[in-house]
Image (tube, rainbow, N blue to C red):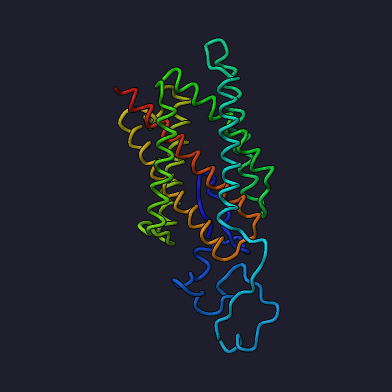
Amino acid sequence: MRSSNPVFSRRGFSRDNGYAGFNAQQPQAGGPAVGNPYATNPYATNPYAPADAQLGAPQQAPARANVMTIDDVVARTAMTLGTVVLTAILSWVLLPVDPASLGKSYGIAIGAALVAFVLALVQSFKRKASPALILSYAAFEGVFLGVISSAVSTYIANGVVAQAVLGTMAVFAGVLIAYKMRWIRVTRRFYGFVMAAAMGFVLLMMVNLLFSVFGGGDGLGFRSGGLGILFGVIGVILGACFLALDFKQVEDGITYGAPREESWLAAFGLTMTLVWIYLEMLRLLSILQGDD
């Protein structure tokens, strides 16, 4: 089973492209996994099974070097998010959204968003993580965020960008604490619910976009007023659920000895999820301030 975020197709940490957290048996607290670890650990290797393994005795997977650690995930996530922030700041400064250059800035932002989306899809379907591809995605995503944030701050709600950033950080910290305290448990049912809700949410937003393009105005009204606030809250909640799935994916990758290069996948997923939360938070706060 795969983890999820806005792209929906990012694979999880497992040798067969499955989701390790649901394909593998979780280890007991304070001890190894119950049963044969070569059958439960998707990263275990067993070229020559010991004789007692054939009798059903638990066997530890041999220690392997070059495995993913939390430090690897933190370092690569910092690099990816740092790229997003840097390019966002540069685009805010170099691509002003004043009336004289508004069309040009919007055109660049839309082009950058499309390129970022394509790069994200390519990485999602690749069997291995590509650092160059992931950092390129982060750079183009940053250009899009920089222009959009500048436009919202200039024409809709001054100061809302800082609030959206703080809100995104608060959601991240809250979900991390809840996950570490086991208030949130990622199960197969949780995964299925999040996937169904996310797909429905995205489909509604696409329909709304089509109505707004061909019918004018705000389409079905999902981006303003009471409905806009409701769907903004739903979008933030979905982002929080994506974070829980990402944390589970990272935890499983470390527990089962994922290769170190897969920490780039963790950084990729976390970055996409945080971008999702920031955009939904920016939209929600803009609507709330616009209604004041």
| Left or right: 126 in relation to 23 | right
**Whether residue 105 is situated above or below residue 177 in the rendered picture:** above
Q: Residue at x 47, y 31 (%)?
A: 209
Q: In this view, does 155 lie above or below 62?
A: above
- Is 185 on the left or on the right of 149, as rendered? left
Query: What residue is rendered at 60% in x and 47% in y?
Result: 76
Q: How many labels does the image show?
A: 0
Extreme residue in the top direction: 100
The residue located at (56%, 60%) in the rendering is 253
Q: Which of 6 and 163 is in front in this view?
A: 163
| Quadrant into which the C terminus falls | top left
Tell me if residue 37 comes above or below residue 93 in the rendering: below
Where residue 49 sits in the image (x, y, percent)? 66, 82
Dividing the picture into quadrants, the one containing residue 66 is bottom right
> Where residue 32 sits: x, y (%)?
51, 75
**Image location of residue 121, percent across then percent down:** 61, 44
Residue at x-position 60% and y-position 88%: 52
Q: Eyeballing the image, is 97 above or below 62?
A: above
Q: Where is residue 95 in the image (x, y as percent from the top left)?
A: 59, 19
- State the residue lying farthest toward the front: 71
Q: In which quarter of the image is residue 285?
A: top left
In this rendered view, identify the residue nearer to me: 173 or 266: 173
